[in-house]
Protein backbone atom coordinates (compact mmCIF):
# COMPACT_ATOMS: atom_id res chain seq x y z
CA UNK A 1 0.00 0.00 0.00
CA UNK A 2 1.08 3.56 -0.67
CA UNK A 3 2.59 5.47 2.25
CA UNK A 4 4.54 8.15 0.41
CA UNK A 5 3.05 11.59 -0.40
CA UNK A 6 2.74 12.13 -4.14
CA UNK A 7 2.67 8.47 -5.09
CA UNK A 8 -0.12 7.42 -7.46
CA UNK A 9 -3.06 5.79 -5.70
CA UNK A 10 -3.95 2.34 -7.02
CA UNK A 11 -7.71 1.98 -6.65
CA UNK A 12 -10.00 -1.06 -6.86
CA UNK A 13 -13.69 -0.43 -7.71
CA UNK A 14 -16.21 -3.03 -6.52
CA UNK A 15 -19.90 -2.84 -7.45
CA UNK A 16 -22.31 -5.35 -8.97
CA UNK A 17 -24.04 -2.65 -11.06
CA UNK A 18 -22.27 -1.84 -14.34
CA UNK A 19 -23.51 1.76 -14.35
CA UNK A 20 -22.33 2.33 -10.79
CA UNK A 21 -18.87 0.93 -11.62
CA UNK A 22 -18.68 3.17 -14.67
CA UNK A 23 -19.68 6.21 -12.62
CA UNK A 24 -16.78 5.71 -10.19
CA UNK A 25 -14.19 4.83 -12.84
CA UNK A 26 -15.20 7.86 -14.94
CA UNK A 27 -14.69 10.14 -11.95
CA UNK A 28 -11.34 8.51 -11.13
CA UNK A 29 -10.19 9.03 -14.72
CA UNK A 30 -10.08 12.77 -14.05
CA UNK A 31 -7.62 12.33 -11.16
CA UNK A 32 -4.02 12.68 -12.25
CA UNK A 33 -2.59 10.78 -9.28
CA UNK A 34 -4.99 7.82 -9.46
CA UNK A 35 -4.69 4.51 -11.33
CA UNK A 36 -7.68 2.13 -11.52
CA UNK A 37 -5.89 -1.11 -10.61
CA UNK A 38 -8.96 -3.25 -11.16
CA UNK A 39 -12.75 -3.53 -11.29
CA UNK A 40 -14.75 -6.29 -9.58
CA UNK A 41 -18.38 -7.16 -10.27
CA UNK A 42 -19.09 -9.15 -7.11
CA UNK A 43 -17.78 -9.89 -3.65
CA UNK A 44 -15.93 -13.10 -4.47
CA UNK A 45 -13.94 -11.37 -7.23
CA UNK A 46 -13.30 -8.47 -4.86
CA UNK A 47 -11.66 -10.75 -2.29
CA UNK A 48 -9.43 -12.31 -4.96
CA UNK A 49 -8.43 -8.94 -6.44
CA UNK A 50 -7.73 -7.28 -3.09
CA UNK A 51 -5.36 -10.14 -2.22
CA UNK A 52 -3.71 -10.22 -5.65
CA UNK A 53 -3.50 -6.50 -6.46
CA UNK A 54 -3.01 -5.01 -2.97
CA UNK A 55 -4.66 -1.70 -3.93
CA UNK A 56 -4.13 1.48 -1.92
CA UNK A 57 -7.86 2.26 -1.76
CA UNK A 58 -11.07 0.29 -2.37
CA UNK A 59 -14.47 1.69 -3.37
CA UNK A 60 -16.69 -1.09 -2.01
CA UNK A 61 -20.42 -1.49 -2.61
CA UNK A 62 -22.18 -2.61 0.57
CA UNK A 63 -25.18 -4.34 -1.03
CA UNK A 64 -24.14 -7.10 -3.42
CA UNK A 65 -25.75 -10.48 -4.09
CA UNK A 66 -23.74 -13.48 -2.97
CA UNK A 67 -21.22 -11.67 -0.78
CA UNK A 68 -21.88 -8.22 0.68
CA UNK A 69 -19.23 -5.56 1.12
CA UNK A 70 -19.18 -6.24 4.87
CA UNK A 71 -18.56 -9.94 4.17
CA UNK A 72 -15.70 -9.00 1.85
CA UNK A 73 -14.05 -7.05 4.68
CA UNK A 74 -14.59 -9.92 7.11
CA UNK A 75 -13.02 -12.43 4.71
CA UNK A 76 -9.98 -10.25 3.99
CA UNK A 77 -9.62 -9.31 7.66
CA UNK A 78 -9.69 -5.77 9.03
CA UNK A 79 -5.92 -5.70 9.58
CA UNK A 80 -5.27 -6.56 5.92
CA UNK A 81 -8.06 -4.48 4.37
CA UNK A 82 -6.93 -1.45 2.34
CA UNK A 83 -8.50 1.93 3.21
CA UNK A 84 -12.11 1.55 2.15
CA UNK A 85 -14.79 3.92 0.93
CA UNK A 86 -18.14 2.18 1.40
CA UNK A 87 -20.78 2.83 -1.26
CA UNK A 88 -24.40 2.26 -0.26
CA UNK A 89 -27.93 3.08 -1.35
CA UNK A 90 -29.14 2.74 2.25
CA UNK A 91 -28.18 5.77 4.32
CA UNK A 92 -30.17 4.48 7.30
CA UNK A 93 -28.03 1.34 7.70
CA UNK A 94 -25.13 1.75 10.11
CA UNK A 95 -23.82 4.89 8.46
CA UNK A 96 -22.39 6.20 11.74
CA UNK A 97 -20.54 2.95 12.21
CA UNK A 98 -19.20 3.07 8.64
CA UNK A 99 -18.09 6.65 9.25
CA UNK A 100 -16.05 5.54 12.25
CA UNK A 101 -14.57 2.51 10.55
CA UNK A 102 -14.06 3.56 6.94
CA UNK A 103 -12.21 6.35 5.22
CA UNK A 104 -15.64 7.59 4.15
CA UNK A 105 -18.93 6.42 2.70
CA UNK A 106 -20.93 7.47 -0.34
CA UNK A 107 -24.72 7.24 -0.45
CA UNK A 108 -26.09 6.58 -3.93
CA UNK A 109 -26.78 8.76 -5.83
CA UNK A 110 -23.77 10.93 -4.95
CA UNK A 111 -22.57 14.03 -6.75
CA UNK A 112 -19.07 14.87 -8.01
CA UNK A 113 -18.27 17.10 -5.03
CA UNK A 114 -19.13 14.40 -2.48
CA UNK A 115 -17.00 11.92 -4.42
CA UNK A 116 -14.06 14.34 -4.36
CA UNK A 117 -14.39 14.71 -0.59
CA UNK A 118 -14.28 10.96 -0.05
CA UNK A 119 -11.32 10.45 -2.38
CA UNK A 120 -9.51 13.37 -0.72
CA UNK A 121 -9.91 11.74 2.69
CA UNK A 122 -8.55 8.47 1.34
CA UNK A 123 -5.59 10.23 -0.26
CA UNK A 124 -4.72 12.04 2.98
CA UNK A 125 -5.03 8.91 5.09
CA UNK A 126 -2.74 6.90 2.81
CA UNK A 127 -0.20 9.72 2.64
CA UNK A 128 -0.20 10.12 6.43
CA UNK A 129 0.20 6.36 6.89
CA UNK A 130 -2.78 6.07 9.22
CA UNK A 131 -3.97 2.75 7.83
CA UNK A 132 -3.14 0.85 11.03
CA UNK A 133 -5.35 3.15 13.11
CA UNK A 134 -8.20 2.66 10.65
CA UNK A 135 -7.79 -1.14 10.84
CA UNK A 136 -8.31 -1.03 14.60
CA UNK A 137 -11.55 0.91 14.16
CA UNK A 138 -12.71 -1.49 11.48
CA UNK A 139 -12.08 -4.50 13.72
CA UNK A 140 -14.25 -2.89 16.41
CA UNK A 141 -17.10 -2.31 13.98
CA UNK A 142 -16.93 -5.83 12.55
CA UNK A 143 -17.19 -7.24 16.06
CA UNK A 144 -20.72 -5.83 16.11
CA UNK A 145 -20.49 -2.58 18.02
CA UNK A 146 -18.16 0.39 18.36
CA UNK A 147 -17.33 0.92 22.04
CA UNK A 148 -17.50 4.69 21.93
CA UNK A 149 -20.53 5.16 19.74
CA UNK A 150 -22.69 2.21 20.75
CA UNK A 151 -23.82 2.02 17.14
CA UNK A 152 -25.07 -1.41 16.13
CA UNK A 153 -23.83 -2.61 12.76
CA UNK A 154 -26.48 -4.19 10.57
CA UNK A 155 -25.55 -5.31 7.07
CA UNK A 156 -28.25 -4.24 4.64
CA UNK A 157 -30.13 -6.92 2.76
CA UNK A 158 -28.70 -7.25 -0.71
CA UNK A 159 -31.11 -6.62 -3.56
CA UNK A 160 -30.40 -8.40 -6.84
CA UNK A 161 -32.41 -5.81 -8.78
CA UNK A 162 -31.61 -2.35 -10.10
CA UNK A 163 -32.89 0.51 -7.98
CA UNK A 164 -31.26 3.41 -9.84
CA UNK A 165 -29.88 3.95 -13.33
CA UNK A 166 -27.28 6.61 -14.05
CA UNK A 167 -27.73 8.46 -17.35
CA UNK A 168 -25.34 10.99 -18.85
CA UNK A 169 -26.82 14.26 -20.12
CA UNK A 170 -24.76 17.14 -21.48
CA UNK A 171 -21.68 16.10 -19.55
CA UNK A 172 -23.56 15.54 -16.30
CA UNK A 173 -24.78 12.33 -14.68
CA UNK A 174 -28.44 12.12 -13.69
CA UNK A 175 -29.73 9.35 -11.44
CA UNK A 176 -33.11 7.91 -12.49
CA UNK A 177 -34.94 5.87 -9.81
CA UNK A 178 -36.16 2.66 -11.44
CA UNK A 179 -39.54 3.01 -9.73
CA UNK A 180 -40.18 6.13 -11.84
CA UNK A 181 -39.62 4.41 -15.22
CA UNK A 182 -42.83 3.97 -17.26
CA UNK A 183 -41.38 1.81 -20.03
CA UNK A 184 -38.13 1.10 -21.87
CA UNK A 185 -37.59 0.76 -25.61
CA UNK A 186 -34.58 -0.45 -27.57
CA UNK A 187 -32.84 2.06 -29.83
CA UNK A 188 -29.89 0.45 -31.57
CA UNK A 189 -27.10 -0.06 -29.02
CA UNK A 190 -29.01 2.13 -26.54
CA UNK A 191 -32.11 1.78 -24.41
CA UNK A 192 -34.62 4.63 -24.06
CA UNK A 193 -35.89 5.13 -20.52
CA UNK A 194 -39.31 6.81 -20.62
CA UNK A 195 -39.99 8.61 -17.36
CA UNK A 196 -43.10 10.75 -16.96
CA UNK A 197 -42.97 12.19 -20.47
CA UNK A 198 -39.17 12.52 -20.56
CA UNK A 199 -36.75 10.19 -22.31
CA UNK A 200 -33.20 9.27 -21.29
CA UNK A 201 -30.68 7.23 -23.31
CA UNK A 202 -28.42 4.65 -21.71
CA UNK A 203 -25.97 2.33 -23.43
CA UNK A 204 -27.42 -0.93 -22.14
CA UNK A 205 -28.73 -4.07 -23.80
CA UNK A 206 -32.38 -4.93 -23.26
CA UNK A 207 -31.48 -8.42 -22.06
CA UNK A 208 -29.22 -7.04 -19.34
CA UNK A 209 -31.90 -4.59 -18.23
CA UNK A 210 -34.54 -7.32 -18.19
CA UNK A 211 -32.28 -9.51 -16.05
CA UNK A 212 -31.66 -6.69 -13.54
CA UNK A 213 -35.22 -5.33 -13.23
CA UNK A 214 -37.58 -6.78 -10.62
CA UNK A 215 -40.01 -9.11 -12.49
CA UNK A 216 -42.68 -8.27 -9.92
CA UNK A 217 -42.75 -4.76 -11.38
CA UNK A 218 -41.43 -4.98 -14.96
CA UNK A 219 -42.23 -7.26 -17.90
CA UNK A 220 -40.58 -7.58 -21.30
CA UNK A 221 -43.45 -7.49 -23.77
CA UNK A 222 -41.32 -7.56 -26.91
CA UNK A 223 -37.65 -7.90 -27.83
CA UNK A 224 -37.57 -4.10 -28.00
CA UNK A 225 -39.82 -3.09 -25.09
CA UNK A 226 -40.17 -3.48 -21.31
CA UNK A 227 -43.13 -2.03 -19.38
CA UNK A 228 -43.88 -1.29 -15.77
CA UNK A 229 -46.73 -3.63 -14.90
CA UNK A 230 -48.74 -1.29 -12.70
CA UNK A 231 -49.05 1.12 -15.65
CA UNK A 232 -50.65 -1.45 -17.97
CA UNK A 233 -54.25 -0.32 -18.43
CA UNK A 234 -55.43 -2.85 -21.05
CA UNK A 235 -54.30 -5.69 -23.28
CA UNK A 236 -55.33 -5.28 -26.92
CA UNK A 237 -55.77 -7.95 -29.57
CA UNK A 238 -56.62 -6.89 -33.13
CA UNK A 239 -58.49 -9.15 -35.59
CA UNK A 240 -55.36 -9.45 -37.72
CA UNK A 241 -53.46 -11.09 -34.88
CA UNK A 242 -51.52 -8.03 -33.70
CA UNK A 243 -51.12 -7.62 -29.96
CA UNK A 244 -50.47 -4.50 -27.89
CA UNK A 245 -50.80 -2.95 -24.45
CA UNK A 246 -52.15 0.45 -23.60
CA UNK A 247 -50.53 2.18 -20.67
CA UNK A 248 -52.12 4.66 -18.35
CA UNK A 249 -51.59 7.96 -20.11
CA UNK A 250 -52.41 6.54 -23.54
CA UNK A 251 -49.12 5.08 -24.81
CA UNK A 252 -49.57 1.94 -26.90
CA UNK A 253 -46.78 -0.61 -27.31
CA UNK A 254 -46.57 -3.74 -29.44
CA UNK A 255 -46.58 -7.10 -27.65
CA UNK A 256 -45.07 -10.15 -29.31
CA UNK A 257 -47.38 -13.11 -29.82
CA UNK A 258 -45.19 -15.35 -27.66
CA UNK A 259 -45.35 -12.95 -24.71
CA UNK A 260 -49.01 -11.96 -24.90
CA UNK A 261 -50.43 -14.98 -23.07
CA UNK A 262 -47.72 -14.87 -20.40
CA UNK A 263 -48.42 -11.18 -19.85
CA UNK A 264 -52.11 -12.02 -19.48
CA UNK A 265 -51.30 -14.59 -16.80
CA UNK A 266 -49.05 -12.13 -14.97
CA UNK A 267 -51.83 -9.52 -15.10
CA UNK A 268 -54.42 -12.05 -13.94
CA UNK A 269 -56.34 -12.04 -17.24
CA UNK A 270 -57.93 -15.37 -18.25
CA UNK A 271 -57.78 -16.60 -21.81
Image (cartoon, rainbow, N blue to C red):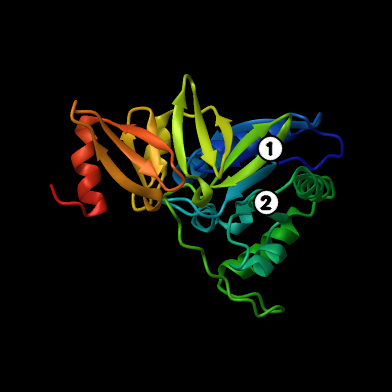
Residue 18 position in % (x across, y down): 52, 36
Separation of marks 1 and 2 at Cα, in angstroms = 20 Å
Residue furthest left as drawn:
271
Report the disc number at residue 85.
2
Residue that carries the numbered disc 1 in the rendered image: 173
> Can residue 249 be seen in this snapshot?
yes
Residue 48 position in % (x across, y down): 49, 40
Tell me, yes or no, whether the two marked residues, 1 and 2, touch with CB atoms within 8 Å: no
Residue at 43 percent of width and 38 percent of height: 251
Dot 1 or dot 2: first in sequence order is 2
Label 2 element class: strand
Residue furthest front as drawn:
239
Above-or-below relation of 32 to 132: above
Residue 7 position in % (x across, y down): 81, 34
Label 1 element class: strand
Report the disc number at residue 135.
none
Q: How many labels does the image show?
A: 2
Quadrant (top left/top right/bottom left/bottom right) for the N terminus:
top right
Residue at 41 percent of width and 45 percent of height: 213
Please rate how many residues cluster around mark 2, counting C-alpha atoms within 10 Å: few if below 14, some from 14 to 19, many from 20: many
Residue at 83 percent of width and 45 percent of height: 127
> Can residue 53 be seen in this snapshot?
no
Quarter residue 259 falls in:
top left
Amino acid sequence: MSDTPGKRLRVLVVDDEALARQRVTDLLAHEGDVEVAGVAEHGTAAVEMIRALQPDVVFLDVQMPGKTGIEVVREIGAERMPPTIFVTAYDHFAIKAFDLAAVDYLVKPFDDERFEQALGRARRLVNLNEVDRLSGMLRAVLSGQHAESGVEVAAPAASPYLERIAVEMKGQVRIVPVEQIDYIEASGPYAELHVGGRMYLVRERMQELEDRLDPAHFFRIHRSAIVRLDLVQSLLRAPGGDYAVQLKGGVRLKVSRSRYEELGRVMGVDG
